[in-house]
Image (cartoon, grey):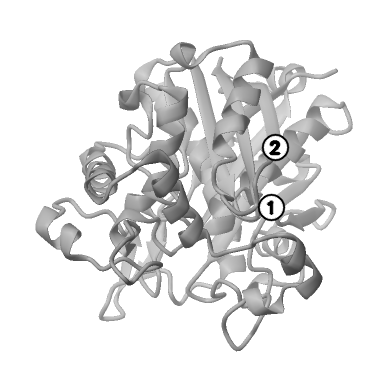
Amino acid sequence: MSEAVIIEAVRTPFGKRNGAFREIRPDSLLAHALRGLVERAGVEAGTVEDVVTGCVTQAGEQGANIGRLAVMLADFPVEVPAVTLNRMCGSSQQAVHFASQAVAAGDISYAIGCGIESMSRAPMFSDIDFEGGGFEKLNPALLAKQDLIHQGESAERIADRWTIGRDDVDAFAAESHRRAAARQSHPEIIPVTGRDADGNEVEVTTDEGVRPNVDPEKMASLKTVFRPGGDGVVTAGNSSQISDGASAVLVGDRERAEADGLVPKARFRARVAVGDDPTMQLTGVIPATRAALKKAGVSMNDLDWIEINEAFATVVLSWADDLKPDMEKVNPWGGAIAHGHPLGATGAGLMAKLVAGLEATDGTLGLQVMCIGHGMATATVVERI
């Protein structure tokens, strides 16, 4: 088998819903990331043999195989194919997995795993019900078999099971913003020209949702969203932000890449996807982490950098309670509560952050793990070269 390596990994800044990227079509935003990726890597677009794209809400401007549309918009040769997949929040992490597996199998030498989501222009659930909602469109026979609930209620049930309080989740959220705001550089980000609130063009170089100064009193005053009666802990402030963004990772065969004069950044030690309880739904990060560490032959103590998606603060805190990581190594640059969670783009975006973080700290081993709707999770262990 060939050795699949990460050659380059980039992402756009993540924009707020109806924020700086509100007038940018998602296929154009992904095309921008793809162009930036190959330019930064120093490769000809024609050397890429497949583009695997993660996108969750494949409707409207994100329909019609948006990956292929973006490849053409990016002016890649027409011979470069593309496919679009949906593993919900883990979509572009899965795209990177599939791209690297194709390289490892020896089928191709270069591939891109990427992701896109404009939650401003293709609202969540619009692929299920164009008039709003979503769960009512699921198969009644399935609902009779499984207690499928909103992820927010799953996050609340996690808080119940792990005895996580409101103060815990609010403190975690504030720390996510503090870490994100403290970043001195953003090496993985490809700047994007967007528009400010007045409609003026502006170059966006950092994530739009980060709040440098979080007011604890204001955070504590936010109402719970999914249990409005007052017995819940999940608020808009301790959950991931609705966002727009794109991300892309160039994967290649190590021998071919080095022969072409490229310098690989990292190699894959483990790639896993797991299924878990569809009602608790977001706890799959725990078995996924264990499976990835076992496959890689490493322990939590061996890891230098961890990126876990902050879909909800309760997800990370329950995972941390079971796995006992060094929390200084967990999302050192903040997470989705601060920088946002553009569904299909987050996976490859977190990988770009992970690789950049390992490089910035001279680290070696990194873990990326994401919870996924309907009770799944994906995890990746990489080793910096």
Contact between labelled residues 2 and 1, with CB atoms less than 8 Å apart: yes
For the residue pair 291 and 309, the one nearer the viewer reads as 291
Relative depth, front residue between 46 and 53:
53
Q: Residue at x 69, y 31 (%)?
A: 272
Residue 385: where, in percent of width, then height? 56, 14
The image position of residue 239, as x and y in percent, is 37, 56
Image vertical order of residue 317 relative to residue 204, above or below: above
At which x and y percent is residue 94? 68, 43
| Residue 302: mark | none
Residue 112: image location, x then y, percent: 69, 42
Depth order, front residue of 128/251: 128
Residues under labels 1 and 2: Cα distance? 10 Å
Residue, disc 1 = 87
**Residue 241 image-quadrant placement:** bottom left
Residue at coordinates 17% horizontally, 51% vertically from top-left? 212
Disc 2 on helix, strand or loop?
A: strand
Q: Residue furthest right?
A: 107
Helix, strand, or loop for circle 1? loop
For the image, the number of numbered tags is 2
Q: Amino acid at mark 2?
A: Ala
Mark 2 nearby-residue class (10 Å; few <14, some 14–19, many ≥20): many
Q: Amino acid at mark 1?
A: Arg
Inspect this view and state whether residue 206 appears: no
Q: Residue at x 26, y 43 (%)?
A: 168
**Between residues 337 and 217, which one lies in front from this camera angle?**
217
**In the image: residue 82, left or right of residue 270:** right
Picture quadrant where residue 343 is located:
bottom right
- Say whether residue 287 is visible: yes
- Residue located at (72% from left, 29% from top): 252
Q: Residues within 10 Å of mark 1 (few under 14, many from 20)?
A: many
Looking at the rendered structure, which numbered label has been put on residue 273? 2
Which image quadrant: the N terminus?
top right
